[in-house]
């Protein structure tokens, strides 16, 4: 089995630079990245709006639930009768 070197030598830093004739490609890449960032920002804003709408809906539902629980605890319904099924008259009376 071959022994791995203790250090890894990289080519000179100049080889990482973009050649002059590829600057147009770099510009296109930059525009593409900026477009993707703009799309992601828009998606995040839209999702934030959805979350805020859902939070408002949850708050409204929690308020309605609290009112219903209060009515049940009072033993009062819209007919003024108790909610105990044994005390309710059947609908055919």
Image: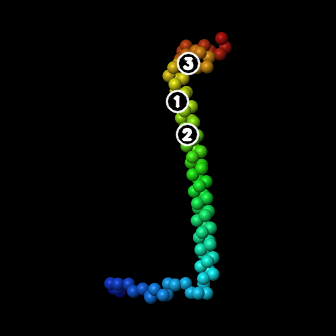
Residue 2 as seen in the image, left or right of residue 76: left
Image quarter (top left, top right, bottom left or bottom right) of the N terminus: bottom left
Please name whichever residue, 62 or 83, is drawn nearer the observer in this view of the structure.
Answer: 62
- Going from N to C along the chain, the mark reached first, 2 or 1, is 2
Residue at 35% across, 84% down? 7
Residue 92 point in image, percent of width and height: 67, 14
Q: From the viewer's perspective, is 2 left or right of 45?
A: left
**In the rendered image, which residue does mark 1 sit on?**
66
Rounded to the nearest whole Å, what is the CA distance between mark 1 and mark 3? Answer: 14 Å
Residue 41, given in percent of the width and then of the height, sits at 58, 60
Give the number of the disc on residue 4.
none
68 up-or-down from 61: above or below: above
Q: In whole angstroms, how far apart are the C-alphas of marks 3 and 2?
A: 25 Å
- Res. 88 image quadrant: top right
Q: Earlier in the sequence, mark 1 or mark 3?
A: 1
Element at label 2: helix
Q: Is residue 1 visible?
A: no
Residue 81 location (% of width, % of height): 58, 15
Disc 2 designates what residue? 58
Q: Residue at x 50, y 84 (%)?
A: 16
Find disc 3 in the rendering and name its residue.
76
The quadrant in which residue 11 appears is bottom left
């Amino acid at each position: 089995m071959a022994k791995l070197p203790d250090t890894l030598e990289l080519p000179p830093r100049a080889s990482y630079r973009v050649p002059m004739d590829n600057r147009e490609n770099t510009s296109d890449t930059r525009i593409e990245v900026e477009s993707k960032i703009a799309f992601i920002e828009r998606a995040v804003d839209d999702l934030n709006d959805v979350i805020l709408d859902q939070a408002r809906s949850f708050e409204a539902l929690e308020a309605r639930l609290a009112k219903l629980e209060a009515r049940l605890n009072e033993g009062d319904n819209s007919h003024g009768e108790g909610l105990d099924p044994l005390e309710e008259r059947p609908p055919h009376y």
